[in-house]
Amino acid sequence: MASTYYSMGNFSSALLYYTKALEIEQKSLPSDHPMLATTYNNIGSVHNSKGNYTEALELYQKTLNIRQKILPENHPDMASIYNNIGSVYNSMGDHEKALEYHTKSFEIRDKSLPPNHPDIALNYERIQ
């Protein structure tokens, strides 16, 4: 339900349901479970969309911390979280930090995805 509300632009309802999911996951899963990383990422995206950049960064950092423990550095999911963090910094006007994270994302995607993958094109756009 949360992702549907998010897609509809109903960020308050999306946040409500993502938060409920997170509460259940925190009680039933280990603290480094990939599902927690996904939920933190999703809640971070809601905050980013609402312009709550500090909250978004905190949640994206939690996502990054979990993924760094459980995934190889060149995994496409690592590229995605670096991209998300870079987007927040860009929105905050910190273009140097944004470039740093978008570059990390690009380097991973360039090594792990086919050369014509649309995510690589996305990174080119974000780096320029």
Image (spheres, rainbow, N blue to C red):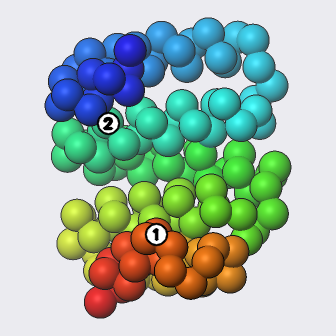
Question: What is the distance, in whole Å, between disc 2 and disc 1 at their CAs?
Answer: 21 Å
Q: Is residue 18 left or right of residue 112?
A: left
- Identify the mark at residue 46; answer none if there is no mark: 2
Q: Is 61 in front, or is 35?
A: 35
**Which mark's residue is nearer the viewer, 2 or 1?**
1
The residue drawn where x is 50% and y is 49% is: 60
Q: Residue 12's x, y, as percent?
A: 23, 20
Say whether residue 80 is left or right of residue 99.
right
* Residue 112 quadrant: bottom right
Which of the two labelled residues, at mark 2 and mark 1, occupies the earlier sequence position? 2
- Label 1's element? helix
Q: Tell me where residue 120 appears, x and y as whole percent.
A: 47, 77
The type of residue carrying mark 1 is Asp
Vertical relation: 43 (above or below) 54: above
- Is 64 situated left or right of 125 in this image? right
| Amino acid at dot 2 | Val
Residue 54 position, x and y percent, is 34, 48
Question: What residue is rendered at 20% in x and 39% in y?
Answer: 50
Rendered-image quadrant of the C terminus? bottom left
